[in-house]
Amino acid sequence: MEITPKIKFLGLTFDLTVMIGTLVTAVLVLIIVLAATRRRDLRPRGMQNIMEMVIEFIQGITNMMLDHKKAARYLGFAVTTFLFIFIANELGVIVMITSEAHHSIPWLGLPEKAEVSWFKSPTSDINVTVAMAFAITIYAHLAGFFKGPKTYLKHYVQPYAWMLPLHIIDELAKPTTHAARLWANIFAGEVLILILAEGAKYITWLPLGAWLGFSLFVGAIQAYIFTVLAMVYISQKIADEH
């Protein structure tokens, strides 16, 4: 894989490629939503029709896990999560910008004569997926605690008190697998695309086009899975039977 430009500030390291990808994804989500909701006709067409299909699709997910009132409250969150991850996943497949640094750039952490990646899917960086997964987990726990502190805490010692360590391990494993699943699929897809693209220079029959199509499909599936799991974790904490 190519290296990415990084900036160190106040003891922290900021990956410019990830920041650019995240910003572009957020802007695209905003533009798409504004374009799709600018004209709300009774007979939807074009972008409005596509957006209504997405909303109805995500609404089906939230309604499966929560009652109607709570599902409506979390619909905006679920739609935003799905759109952001879907677009972030596909950007690295559709657009990859690389260049070769012929001179060392110390303040960006770039050595001399290095292949530099300036744009890729932000979800192919494990720091992004971990941050998103743990943010969702923290919110779910806070929502469950403030809904009913006694019921929330009692859950950890049910059905037996000795199961407390197991419940803690379970809660830590959820965001870990949530983040790793998304990152591993998108990262592996981009690595294979780069390998096939490089190999296609020498072996013309390599199925690069087929793999690009498959990667787009995987990106959509992973956006769906991440959104479903996010709603599952939240619903486990705020559902009435919790």
Image (spheres, grey):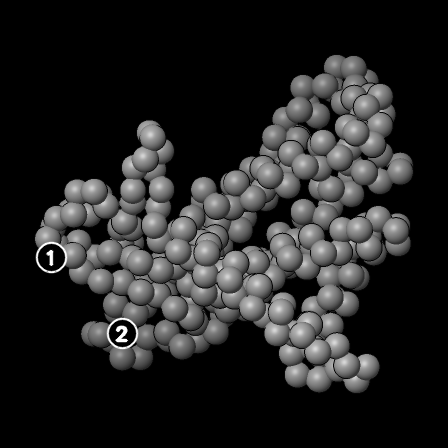
Are the residues at dot 1 and dot 2 in contact (C-beta closer than 8 Å)?
no
- Disc number for residue 49: none
According to the image, label 1 marks what residue? 102
Q: Which element type, helix, strand or loop, lies under badge 1?
A: loop
In percent of the image, x 61 and y 30: which residue is there? 172
Q: Amino acid at mark 2?
A: Ala
- Kindly give the residue lying farthest to the front in the view shown: 38
- Kindly give the residue lying farthest to the top in the view shown: 162
Q: Quadrant of residue 120?
A: bottom left
Q: Which element type, helix, strand or loop, lies under badge 2?
A: loop
Q: Quadrant of residue 225?
A: bottom right
Which-is-in-front pick, marks 1 and 2? 1
Q: Is residue 226 left or right of residue 2?
A: right
Q: Is residue 100 left or right of residue 89?
A: left
In percent of the image, x 79 and y 61: which residue is there? 60
* Residue 59 x, y percent position in the rendering: 78, 61
Q: Quadrant of the N terminus?
A: bottom left
* Crowd rating for badge 1 (residues with CA inside 10 Å; few <14, some 14–19, many 20+): few
Q: CA distance from mark 1 to mark 2?
A: 25 Å
**In the displayed structure, would residue 89 be above or below residue 146?**
below
Q: Earlier in the sequence, mark 1 or mark 2?
A: 1
According to the image, label 2 marks what residue? 200
Q: Amino acid at mark 1?
A: His
Residue 158, can we see it?
no
Q: Count up the numbered dots.
A: 2
* Residue 134 x, y percent position in the rendering: 58, 37
Q: Quadrant of residue 241?
A: top right
Residue 199, can we see it?
yes
* Residue 10 x, y percent position in the rendering: 34, 30
Q: Quadrant of the C terminus?
A: top right
In percent of the image, x 30 and y 70: which residue is there? 197
